Amino acid sequence: MSGVTDLEITKESAVTAVEQGASLTYTVIVSNIGAEDVTGVTVTDDYSDFMAGVSWTALVSGGAVEVTAGSGILNEVIDLPAGSSVEYTISGISEASCAH
């Protein structure tokens, strides 16, 4: 079946609550679980309401094409060959007490 895109996005954190001023780290994983290559995928995560001093790194696998580090709001355009993924690790300081 040609032209079918099957992307999966997972967001994970080891903590369930964080106090204001505490460090916070979580991951966002974008995977192409389909049989077709996908180009020009926009990945955005806006955490400006609850985090400051944010930096991120990206671990690419399976031939995915991505910048491997940055700071500020995650807003990247990536290419994901079939079976590839990008795992973002996002770290910053909590600006407000929050729980999920």
Image: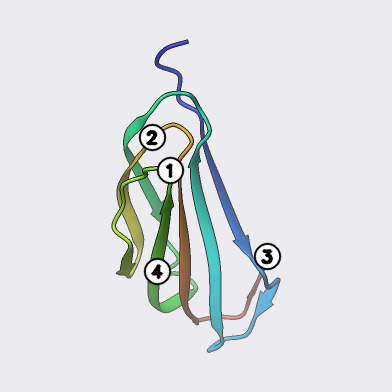
Residue at left 53%, top 33%? Answer: 33
Q: Nearer the viewer, mark 1 or mark 3?
A: 1
* Circles 1 and 2: CB atoms closer than 8 Å: yes
Q: CA distance from mark 3 to mark 4?
A: 21 Å
Q: Residue furthest bottom?
A: 21
Q: Nearer the viewer, mark 1 or mark 2?
A: 1
> Which of marks 4 and 1 precedes in the sequence?
4
Q: Nearer the viewer, mark 3 or mark 4?
A: 4
Q: Nearer the viewer, mark 3 or mark 2?
A: 2
Q: What is the x, y in percent for residue 35?
A: 48, 24
Residue 99: numbered disc: none
> Which of marks 2 and 3 precedes in the sequence?
2
Residue 100: numbered disc: 3
Q: CA distance from mark 3 to mark 2?
A: 32 Å
Q: Residue furthest front?
A: 62
Label 3 neighbourhood size at 10 Å, few (<14), some (14-19), many (20+)? Answer: few
Q: Secondary structure at mark 1?
A: loop
Is 5 rendered above or below residue 67?
above
Quarter holding residue 37: top left
Q: Quadrant of the C terminus?
A: bottom right
In the figure, is residue 31 to the left or right of 42?
right
Q: What is the x, y in percent for residue 40?
A: 29, 37
The residue that mark 1 highlights is 62
Quarter holding residue 18: bottom right
The residue that mark 4 highlights is 56
The residue that mark 2 highlights is 81
Which three-letter amino acid code belongs to the residue tagged 4?
Answer: Trp
Quarter holding residue 56: bottom left
Residue at left 37%, top 43%? Answer: 63
Which three-letter amino acid code belongs to the residue tagged 2?
Answer: Pro
